[in-house]
């Protein structure tokens, strides 16, 4: 009985470790928007997949899957579309400061 419980917990730890590694390797897209007062949110689109994130203190960040993403900044007046951003597993894409006029 003890041996079975130990094997169960070892298996559980292995499964959790595998998922933790996948999460840590997941790419992210982040940036800073200035001025951010009229920005509602940021939308990232890749094929049928999309990620919506809020802008907090002018900054945004979103975990995404590897691939090509289109960035859309939604403001009170219009939507601003940026060219395709390529993400690779295990890397973060920092877009830096995006200035809105």
Image (cartoon, grey):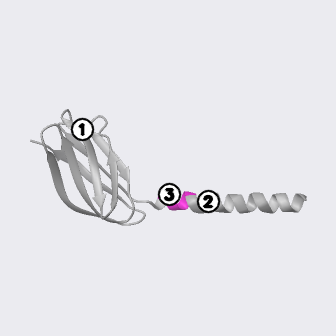
The range drawn in magenta is: 20-24
Sequence order check: which comes first, mark 3 or mark 2? 2
On-image quarter of the N terminus: bottom right
**Labelled pair 3, 2 in contact (Cβ < 8 Å):** no
- 23 within the magenta span: yes
Find the distance from the CA under tag 1 to the CA under tag 2: 37 Å
Pick whichever, 76 or 12, lies toward us: 76
Residue farthest to the front? 48
Instruction: Where is residue 15? Give x, y as percent.
Output: 64, 61
Query: Viewer-nearest of labels 3 and 1?
Result: 1
| Local SS, label 3 | helix
Q: Residue at x 18, y 35 (%)?
A: 38
Ranked by sequence position, the earlier of labels 1 and 2 is 2
Query: In the image, which disc is placed on residue 94?
Result: none
Alpha-carbon span between mark 3 and mark 2: 10 Å
Q: Position of residue 73 (x, y in %)?
A: 21, 47
Main secondary structure type of the part rendered in magenta: helix
How many tags in the picture?
Answer: 3
Q: In the visual, does 20 lie left or right of 42? A: right
State how far apart marks 3 and 1 are (Cα).
27 Å
**Residue located 74% across and 61% down the image:** 10
* Secondary structure of the residue carrying numbered label 2: helix
- Residue 17, numbered circle: 2
How far across and down, in percent of the image, does residue 28 sit?
37, 55
Q: Secondary structure at mark 1?
A: strand
Front label number (1 vs 2): 1
The residue that disc 1 covers is 40
Q: Are marks 1 and 2 in contact (CB under 8 Å)?
A: no
Give yes or no for contact between labels 3 and 1 (Cβ–Cβ under 8 Å): no
- Mark 3 = which residue? 23
Q: Is residue 54 left or right of residue 24?
A: left
Query: x, y (%) of residue 83?
Result: 18, 60
């Amino acid at each position: 009985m003890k041996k079975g419980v130990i094997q169960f917990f070892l298996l559980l730890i292995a499964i959790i470790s595998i998922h933790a590694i996948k999460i840590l390797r997941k790419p992210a897209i982040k940036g800073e928007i200035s001025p951010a007062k009229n920005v509602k949110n940021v939308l990232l689109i890749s094929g049928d997949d999309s990620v919506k994130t809020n802008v907090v203190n002018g900054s945004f960040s979103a975990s995404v899957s590897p691939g090509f993403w289109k960035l859309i900044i939604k403001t009170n007046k219009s939507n601003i579309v940026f060219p395709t951003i390529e993400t690779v597993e295990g890397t973060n894409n920092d877009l830096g400061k995006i200035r809105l006029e």
